[in-house]
Image (cartoon, rainbow, N blue to C red):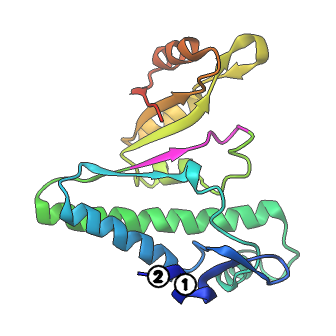
Amino acid sequence: DGFFEKHPELRMRHGDGSPVEKLSFAFPAVRSFHLSIMREAAERFDIDGVNIAFVRLNQAFGESEKPLLDAFRAKYGDIPRTDEKMKKVKEGFFIQFMRDARKVLDEVGRKKDKRLELSAWVWPANSQYGKWSDVDYRAMMKEKLLDSIVVQDLKHDITRGASGVDKGDLAVAHANGCKFYAAPRTDNNYVETLLDGYSKGMDGAAEW
């Protein structure tokens, strides 16, 4: 309905305050807009659940939106901003988004007398992508927000020190009722990565 065009005030901002042509998840209205689409789909169709593809939310925040700056001050006070500290602030917005998503699915599920599952597709935290991703999926699992998780781009290669499925991630998932699926890299060591994951106790594999 032209949500983006109607709300220039909800766009991301560079550090100097200039706008970016994308909506920012720091604004409650943007998160609510996404949740409304989720609710409509869950009510209209006989779905089993929703998977949030965080691997395609490569940029969900800018650097100087007011909610970001307010949240930073609330968490750290009036100190210089660093990328590491700002990353923690941004992670908090995504965790809140998933809390709200869980509530939406629970509300619709109760009306349909079924549990609607919530899943996340993420980059591994120790990967080159995971280091800049603003998704703390371990925190989401510990809050029992997720029924399953898909970890993208895993690779088991002993000769290069690539460990494949992280035992810590797997332990957190299973301790909190969350199924763990691997989405291995397809360039090489695909079968080895799957065998490594199954030997560690993962629940299955996923493909994009």
- Label 2 secondary element: loop
For the point 11% across and 58% down, the residue is 113
Q: Contact (CB < 8 A) between labels 1 and 2? A: yes
Q: Check disc 2: other Cα within 10 Å, few if <14, some if 14-19, many if 20+.
A: few
Tell me which corner region of the image, top left, top right, bottom left or bottom right, holds residue 76: bottom right
Q: Which portion, as a residue range, is magenta?
A: 119-127
Q: Is residue 169 left or right of residue 180?
A: right
Q: Position of residue 114 (x, y in %)?
A: 15, 53
Would residue 43 be found to the left or right of residue 149 on screen? left
Residue 17 placed where, x, y %?
A: 80, 84
- Relative to 28, say whether 45 is above or below: above
Q: Which residue is mark 2?
A: 2
- The image shows residue 136 at horizontal and vertical percentages of 59, 53
The vertical placement of 110 against 201, above or below, is below
Circle 1: residue type: Glu
Q: Nearer the viewer, residue 207 or 164?
A: 207
- Residue in view at x 65 percent, y 57 percent: 134
Quadrant in which the N terminus appears? bottom left
